[in-house]
Image (cartoon, grey):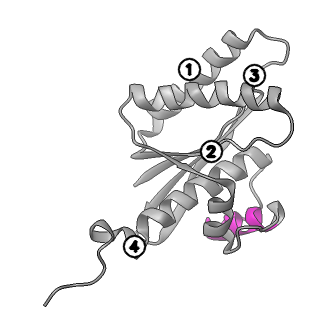
């Protein structure tokens, strides 16, 4: 299975493509989509949409995993990120690719084993799980890989096999 993990944003969108087979994940590609500050919002959104659509065409993922929005204190930034997230969701929907959403807590719990793990711990686990020599950079790309790994692990969980029914009837 090929999974595209996305860390949504407006200035920087992290992406991570992984391949998964059973409980093993491997890196295909990671990086960021950057938009120019000061550019009209509509043009930035178009660029994000077009670049994500190109990634979808190139890698043909079986699923897209995206981080749910987390509002801290800056509502204006949160709204901009929501716009960017919307065009990501649209790009996936246009190509009929299933979309799965995870909270930052779920990603940390699944990847690092602790929902309050520090960013550095999560990034190190991404490096280890994908057998990389170095922690992926920039941080947005590492976050996107963590989201993709989270989806791979949730999908591979015994709780998801056979619709969650892991007990057999004799």
Mark pair 2, 4: CA separation: 22 Å
Residue 36 appears at what percent x and percent y?
A: 80, 18
Q: Residue at x 71, y 30 (%)?
A: 81
Query: Sequence-wise, which precedes: disc 4 or disc 1?
Result: 1
Q: Looking at the picture, does residue 47 appear above or below residue 114?
A: above
Q: Which mark is residue 159?
A: 4
Q: Is residue 64 left or right of residue 11?
A: left
Which mark is in front, 4 or 1? 4
Mark pair 4, 3: CA separation: 39 Å
Residue picked out by circle 1: 50
Span colored in magenta: 121-134
Query: Sequence-wise, which precedes: disc 4 or disc 3?
Result: 3
Q: Looking at the picture, does residue 142 appear above or below residue 97?
A: below
* SS category of the residue bearing label 2: loop
Residue picked out by circle 2: 68
Q: Which mark is residue 75?
A: none
Which mark is in front, 2 or 1? 2
Residue 129 lies in the magenta stretch: yes
Query: Sequence-wise, which precedes: disc 2 or disc 1?
Result: 1
């Amino acid at each position: 299975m090929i999974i595209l993990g996305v860390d949504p944003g407006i200035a920087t969108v992290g992406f991570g493509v992984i391949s998964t087979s059973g409980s093993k994940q491997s890196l295909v590609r990671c990086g960021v989509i950057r938009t120019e500050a000061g550019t009209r919002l509509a043009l930035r959104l178009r660029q994000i949409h077009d670049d994500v659509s190109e990634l979808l065409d190139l890698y043909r993922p079986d699923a897209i995993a995206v981080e749910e929005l987390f509002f801290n204190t800056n509502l204006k930034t949160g709204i901009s990120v929501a716009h960017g997230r919307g065009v990501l969701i649209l790009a996936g929907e246009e190509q009929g690719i299933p979309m799965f959403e995870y909270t930052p807590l779920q990603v940390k719990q699944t990847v690092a084993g602790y929902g309050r793990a520090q960013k550095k711990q999560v990034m190190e686990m991404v490096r280890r799980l994908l057998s990389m020599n170095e922690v992926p950079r920039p941080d947005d790309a590492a976050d996107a890989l963590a989201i993709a790994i989270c989806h791979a692990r949730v999908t591979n969980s015994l709780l998801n096999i056979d619709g969650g029914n892991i007990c057999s009837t004799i």
